[in-house]
Image (tube, rainbow, N blue to C red):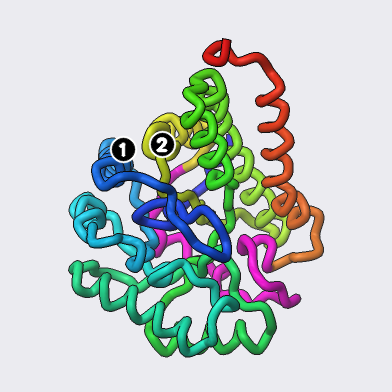
Amino acid sequence: MAEIRVALTFDDLPSLVLDAPSATCEVMDPGERRCVAQRLVETLRSASVPAVAFVNSGFLGGQEDLVRPWIEAGVELGNHTARHSSVDSLPLDVWADEVRECDAFLGAMGSTGRRFFRHPYLRYGGSPHRQAAARRFLLEEGYVQAHATAVPADWLLARFYREARDCGDTTRMRRVEERLAGHTLEVLEAAHHSLRRLLGRPAPQVLDLHVHRLAAAHLDSTLDRLRKGGACFIPLTEALADPVYQLDPTEWSAGGSWVERLAPASADALWFRRQPDRLRRWWREQCELPSQSSG
């Protein structure tokens, strides 16, 4: 079994952004948000896994203390814009102000270390000009772009989990829980093999998960499954030091995982783009099966 060096990251702190372009957060009361944050950081601490969490500061709703457990656990905080705005959704100067707003919040919270930025929705810009302008701005602001290679559709599984939970359907909740670890490992392995084919050598991966109820409840089993599959967790700085993350994509693409951006017309890129639809078909099949909780 081949070792896969992987940096773990989380998007959408304080909680999963559900819908584009309206950018609304997974609905939780303040107590549940704190519980989700605490469970995630406790799992990371007990598993000794380094991580970076990307923050939407404008969605904290006065609960700035939600980021404190992450900092105290040694998790570095990165910039995900104030309100999860893609670079195409706003005039460039307004988008830049959102980046600066989140940056000011992170500084006020005492976040230290490298200044990482990740584009919401992994959208780098809808035109070569917009993409170049955004990249230039981030460089001028001193940011390192946290490209992600392994991008599971855990955000979609979190929606399925919420649907089952809202219906009190414990059978389907368990099916989603089991799917999370398997799907995440499948995507990580695919990204590992894709980069190896592109580069002719193995390269460290950057895994992109999200902050949500499903992750809080089952991050421990997911990390265990990944380790059994060969994952060795490393800091994001170590992963991004690999030359693959300094490459300029030879073909322009609006966004996606770093594998998709490096080879947007490849069969591997097509496989990654099809994952959400594969999960939707799987969920429809699950909904057609009998559920013990529904009688």
Report which residue position mark 2 lands on: 219
User: On the picture, is 267 further left or further right than 23?
Assistant: right
Q: Classify mark 1: helix, strand or loop.
A: helix
The stretch in magenta equals 232-261
Residue 264 on image: x %, y %: 75, 65
Q: Nearer the viewer, residue 115 or 7?
A: 115
Residue 275 on image: x %, y %: 69, 46
Q: Classify mark 2: helix, strand or loop.
A: helix
Give the crowd class for mark 2: few <14, some 14-19, many >=20 residues within 10 Å. Answer: many
- Name the residue: 69% across, 68% down: 262
Whether residue 160 is visible to the viewer of this picture, yes or no, is yes
Q: Nearer the viewer, residue 291 or 150?
A: 291
User: Is 245 rendered above or below residue 42?
Assistant: below
Report which residue position mark 1 lands on: 43
- Name the residue: 55% across, 69% down: 245
- Name the residue: 81% across, 54% down: 267
Q: Is residue 240 magenta?
A: yes
Q: Identify the amino acid type marked 1.
A: Thr
User: Is 254 rendered above or below residue 136?
Assistant: above
Residue 114 on image: x %, y %: 33, 71
Q: Is residue 36 magenta?
A: no
Q: Which quarter of the image is occupied by the C terminus?
A: top right
Residue 139 on image: x %, y %: 45, 85
